[in-house]
Structure formats: C-alpha cells, structure tokens
Amino acid sequence: MPETVVHFQIRMPPVLHEQLASWAKEDKASLNALIVGILEKAMETHAAKTPGKE
C-alpha cells in the first residue's frame, strides 16, 4: 500500500455502480480495489500505446 492515498469522489450512473459492485463481490474484492485495478490496467494499456510515456 502506498504511503500516500488520494481520496476523491466520482459520479457514475447507478446501473454502472451496481454492475461494478456485483463484479467486486464475485471477485471477493472491495469496490475500491476493483476500480483501482481497472484504472491501473487502463494506464498500462495507455502507456503501451503512447511512445515515451510510462
């Protein structure tokens, strides 16, 4: 776990929240952990597509 954690709020449609919460429950993970994982994977994909970015 990083030493510094940033907190922020995100607005999303209720249906999306329900879908993500269901996915997290299936994976036996917290909703926060699921979303952080999704964002990390998106950043890896973005970095792979963008030369010179890490």
Image: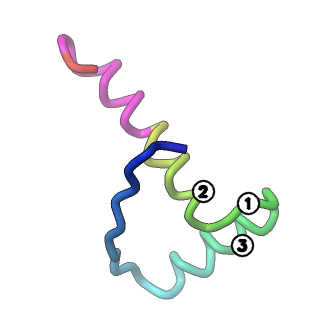
Question: Tag 1: Cα neighbours inside 10 Å, few (<14), some, or many (≥20)?
Answer: few
Q: Which residue is found at the position 36% from the left and 35% from the top?
A: 43
Secondary structure under tag 1 reads loop
Q: Horizontal and vertical percent for residue 1?
A: 55, 44
Q: Which residue is mark 1?
A: 29
Establish if 4 lies above or below 46.
below
Q: Which residue carries the number 3 mark?
A: 22
Q: CA distance from mark 2 to mark 1?
A: 6 Å
Circles 3 and 1, Cβ within 8 Å, touching? The answer is: no
At x 43%, y 47%, the residue is 39
Secondary structure under the numbered disc 2 in the rendered image: helix
Q: Is residue 36 magenta?
A: no
- Tell us which disc is closer to us: 3 or 2: 2
Spot the residue most to the bottom. Answer: 14
Residue 22 left/right relative to 20: right
Q: Amino acid at mark 2?
A: Ala
Most frequent secondary structure within the magenta stretch:
helix
Quarter holding residue 3: top left
Residue 4 position (above or below residue 40): below
Within 10 Å of the Cα at label 2, are there few (<14), some (14-19), or many (20+) other Cα atoms?
few
Alpha carbons under labels 3 and 2: distance apart: 13 Å
Question: Which of label 3 and label 1 is nearer to you?
Answer: 1
Give the Cα distance between marks 3 and 1: 10 Å
Q: How many residues crowd around disc 3 within 10 Å: few (fewer than 14), some, or many (20 or more)? A: few
Q: Which residue is mark 2?
A: 33
Q: Are marks 2 and 1 in contact (CB under 8 Å)?
A: yes
Of residue 22 and residue 7, the one placed in the foreground of this image is: 7
